[in-house]
Image: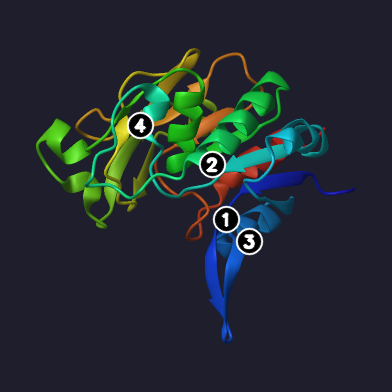
């Protein structure tokens, strides 16, 4: 049986190899390894021409919106916060167009960290630009593990159970949920750490990185949903 093609969004940035420094399409290898482990065939998707979006969606069986720098606040009508990294508008535009096309085509989608934020703003939602200020603590920015409660009736919950320990620092979070999204995972301070799009075959966003470590169950679930 042929493996489903799973697209993975990427950076388009400068990289060094040998004595060369050139622009390159970049992706942490954990994403490709997780897709391969789950039985999919990883395909790196560079944030270039918007005209290629429909072709990608027609050719792919599933999509991972990967992590990275924060989404440009201009997308949801706010100003950039100098405490976060400089936004990458070209990547934002490309990934939002890709996410919308995948949703419209009922292609399975997994949004990871930034990818969950892309999913949310694509559907009209907004973000908390600086989470420590909103919740009055910096536990979300720490790299120590913390518990996440997961709805067992959600697709994520059916894959990983009702809770998970994660260690993924982040400085932003979801504020207003996008149209059709429902919260399916929460930190102990009730910050939303996971969402799911109602009525879609598989469209899940999580704040943590399921491609890292030994727990591959969410990526497994994406690849399973991508198999015709």
Name the element at disc 3: helix
Of the residues under marks 1 and 4, which one precedes in the sequence? 1
Q: Which mark is residue 197?
A: none
Above or below for 18 versus 55? below
- At horizontal 43% and vertical 33% (from top left) the residue drawn is 117
Residue that badge 4 annotates: 73
Q: Residues within 10 Å of mark 4 (few under 14, many from 20)?
A: some
x, y percentage for residue 103?
64, 23
Q: Which residue is mark 2?
A: 90
Q: Nearer the viewer, mark 3 or mark 1?
A: 1
Circles 3, 4 touching at the beta carbon (< 8 Å) = no
Q: Quadrant of residue 178?
A: top left
Q: Which residue is mark 3?
A: 33
Q: Nearer the viewer, residue 13 or 203?
A: 13
Within 10 Å of disc 2 (Cα), the crowding (few <14, some 14-19, many 20+) is some
Establish if 113 lies above or below 21: above
Q: CA distance from mark 2 to mark 1?
A: 9 Å
Q: Where on the picture, by quarter, is residue 162?
A: top left
Estimate the spatial distance between the alpha carbons at disc 3 and disc 4, rounded to whole Å: 31 Å
How far across and down, in percent of the image, does residue 203 sit? 58, 28
Q: On the rendered image, what quadrant is the C terminus found in?
A: top right
Residue at position x 22%, y 38% from top? 130
Q: Are marks 1 and 4 in contact (CB under 8 Å)?
A: no
Residue that carries the numbered disc 1 in the rendered image: 12
């Amino acid at each position: 049986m042929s493996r489903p093609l799973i697209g993975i969004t990427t950076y388009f940035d400068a990289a060094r190899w040998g004595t060369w420094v050139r622009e390159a399409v970049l992706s942490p290898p954990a994403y490709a390894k997780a897709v391969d482990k789950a039985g999919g065939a990883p395909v790196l998707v560079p944030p270039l021409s918007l005209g290629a979006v429909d072709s990608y969606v027609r050719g792919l069986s599933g999509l991972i919106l990967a992590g990275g720098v924060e989404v440009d606040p201009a997308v949801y009508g706010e100003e950039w916060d100098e405490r976060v990294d400089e936004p990458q508008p070209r990547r934002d535009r490309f990934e939002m167009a890709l996410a919308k096309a995948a949703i419209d085509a009922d292609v399975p989608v997994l949004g990871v960290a930034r990818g969950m934020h892309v999913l949310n703003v694509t559907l009209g939602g907004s973000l908390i630009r600086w989470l420590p200020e909103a919740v009055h603590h910096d536990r979300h920015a720490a790299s120590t593990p913390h518990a996440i409660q997961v709805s067992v009736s959600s697709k994520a919950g059916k894959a990983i159970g009702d809770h998970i320990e994660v260690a993924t620092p982040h400085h932003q979070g979801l504020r207003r949920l996008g149209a059709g999204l429902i919260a399916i995972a929460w930190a102990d301070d009730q910050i939303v750490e996971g969402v799911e799009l109602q009525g879609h075959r598989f469209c899940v966003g999580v704040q943590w990185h399921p491609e890292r470590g030994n727990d591959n169950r969410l990526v497994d679930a994406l690849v399973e949903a991508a198999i015709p």
